[in-house]
Amino acid sequence: MLFPRPAPAIHAASSTPEVVVLMGTHQGADFLEEQLTSIERQSHARWSLVVADDGSRDGTWNILETFQRRHVPGRVQLRRGPGEGYARNFLALARDPGLEAPYYAFADQDDIWEPEKLTHALAWLESVPAGTKALYGARTCLIDEAGRKIGFSPCFSHRPCFANALVQNIAGGNTMVFNDAARQLLAYCGAAPQAVSHDWWFYQAVTACDGIVCYDTRPTMRYRQHERNLVGASNDGLYNGWKRLERLWNGQFRAWMDYNLQSLAELRPLMAEENRADLDEFVLARSSIRPWGRLVHGLRSGVHRHNWKGTTVLLMALMLGKV
């Protein structure tokens, strides 16, 4: 038996909102059981799980089938992913027209959710006016392969907004919980956008279209760091600062900007007028011939990172044509 016998089921009141957990997997057998167990132990008991596996060959699918059999039919759904990488896998899940729920959450295969993760997210999401696009994200506790705590992800103190989302992602997709109004933005875009990552794109989309974003400074999950991580969590430290500068200098960050702006073009009809204006200024900043022209348009766009050093480096890179 791959999983220990569960505690007696908690029957949530019918008024408790359902959360559909959207998980993407690929070669995740090493840590998947622990993550599934942490989802099962959520204090918010009314959840269902939809997993898209992207071609695993390591026993991931067998673990998922065993977990599925432990629950009532329909609570855990398994499907094959599109085979186009992790971002496309998550976006395809989120755009599925067959899913109907008030709230959704992204989940990676190798983390550990704290028992109150969904409860904390829903406490904020339930306070948002009906019909408002709302996205919740949070800080994380970092752990190593053995589950030992090794630190925390950065703590961002400024208000989440579109001018920040254009140049920085502040919350990992594995922390994100969102309402159906926000999910409809992904459905509106149809085919998977060219965005670099599903979480950064989602932060951009929600803030661009007059939605609201909550960044919770309380760590709500343990984010496992290991050599197979597609995306690391820490933005702090000299090494990570150097890697960011390297991406700026070699043109990788500018290429990411190109992809994200192509994706945002699809959302333009839904954008708030102010955000369209900021986006246009940023596009002018990137296309201007003279460095001072890039700086002037960049300042007008309001783009910034969550500390003055990061914003200073960003504007300097923009002047050099590296953004």
Image (cartoon, rainbow, N blue to C red):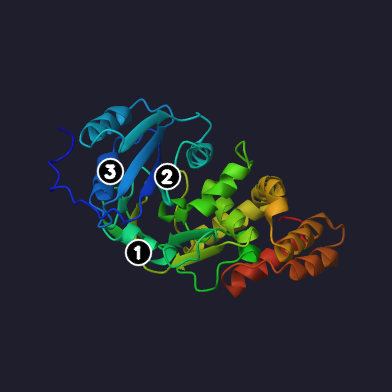
- Where is mark 1, residue-wise? 120
Labels 3, 1: front one:
1
Q: Which mark is residue 36?
A: 3
Residue at disc 1, secondary structure = helix
Identified at 59% across, 49% down, the residue is 185
Task: Determine whether, in the image, residue 273 is placed left or right of residue 73.
Answer: right
Q: Earlier in the sequence, mark 2 or mark 3?
A: 3
Q: Quadrant of the C terminus?
A: bottom right
Asked if residue 167 can be seen in this view, the reply is: no
Residue at disc 3, secondary structure = helix
Three-letter code, disc 1: His
Relative to 147, residue 53 above or below: above
Rounded to the nearest whole Å, what is the CA distance between mark 2 and mark 1?
A: 26 Å
Rounded to the nearest whole Å, what is the CA distance between mark 2 and mark 3?
A: 18 Å
Three-letter code, disc 2: Asn
Crowding near the residue tagged with mark 1, few <14, some 14–19, many ≥20 C-alpha atoms within 10 Å: some
